[in-house]
Amino acid sequence: MKIEKKSEPKAKMKVINGSAFAIETAPHLPKLHQACVVVAKRGGGKTTAVSNLLRMYKETGAMDRILIVSPTFLSNKKLLEHLDIDENDVFDDPDAPGIVEKIKDIVNAERDEFLRWKQLKANYEKVMKQMRAGRVYDDEFLMSYYDPKTNDFKVPEPKYPCYRQGRPPVISCIFDDCMNSRLYTGRTLASLVISHRHQGQFPTGGAVGISLFFLIQSYKAQSGLPKCIRNQATSALIFRTKDNDELRKNIADSFSGEIDPEVFIELYQEATKDSPHDFLFVDLHHKKGIQPSGFRKNFDEYLIPPVN
């Protein structure tokens, strides 16, 4: 059947400036923000892979604060030491009430701190000039500018170096070993995933946002990661599995909108054939134009599927 077409130029759509993945990252790394699903059996290398990705973000100046929700954090502490995760940013009980709200509060507090520093910086010259002219300010306000080391007033040091670049901190949260927890069965986590890049909204537009990394042992296990969260994934790390039904019927089919399931299986087999700790990395929605493929063996080798 031949379909007749007729253009309506007055109804042409325009692309709105801005991006769902607006954070600048190094050319070899995926864009942020992420909602990343990592699937591997117990001891398969999930934590090692994610900690290395976050390390690369930190080393290239694109990650400032990392939270973690995990009852097994202490056993993986050595793997995560190089990420400088503050003990106050560790939530070791995924069944505890209010975890998602606490994460949102952290993002909002980081937004407020960034805006406060920007305001202090913008007003510094004006305040110093008026103070020299005899205007009296509240002591608490002036202490924001006071440096006891030099006994002088100056622009306060930023909490993060990125403030000087005009951007708020980049924040991420790892969810590890949370299967069968209250966190995965409630609605609040799904709501966070859906709105993760909009968290910590600015009055003038834009948001701080937060990247989320879900480390799971089975892609569609009962009491595992809910479907509504899996459907929001922007990337995935798929390690070797002996469950062919899960691989073909669940994982490959989930990516059928991006690539033919049989081609996906071939890419997966190529990525995982050499070691049980190798994985197929899939950049689902936003590979950069300078990157030759949205598929990689681990992070350092692109796999380029054939073009039909």
Image (spheres, rainbow, N blue to C red):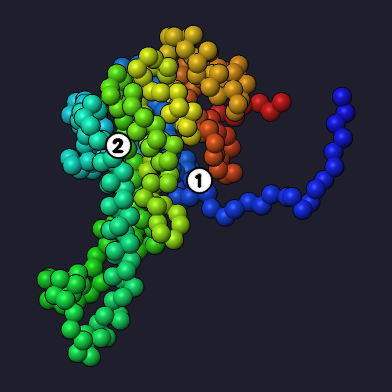
* Residue farthest along the front direction in this orientation: 187
Above or below, comparing residue 24 to residue 165 in the picture: above
Q: Secondary structure at mark 1?
A: loop
Residue at image point 66% right, 52% down: 14
Q: Position of residue 57 (x, y in %)?
A: 38, 44
Q: Name the amino acid, label 1.
A: Ala
Badge number at residue 100: 2
Q: Secondary structure at mark 2?
A: helix
Q: Position of residue 269 (x, y in %)?
A: 51, 17
Task: Write down the residue under mark 1.
Answer: 20
Badge number at residue 301: none
User: Where, by quadrant of the figure, is residue 216 drawn?
Assistant: top left
Q: Name the amino acid, label 2.
A: Val
- Viewport quadrant of the C terminus: top right
Asked whether residue 103 is in view, the answer is yes
Badge 2 density bin: few <14, some 14–19, many ≥20, Cα 10 Å: some
Q: Nearer the viewer, residue 148 or 279?
A: 148
Above or below, comparing residue 207 to residue 263 in the picture: below
Q: As drawn, is 180 to the left or to the right of 264?
A: left
Residue at image point 87% right, 35% down: 4
User: Where, by quadrant of the figure, is residue 67 drawn?
Assistant: top left
Comparing marks 2 and 1, which lies closer to the viewer?
A: 2
- Viewport quadrant of the N terminus: top right
Asked whether residue 150 is in view, the answer is no
Residue at image point 42% right, 32% down: 36
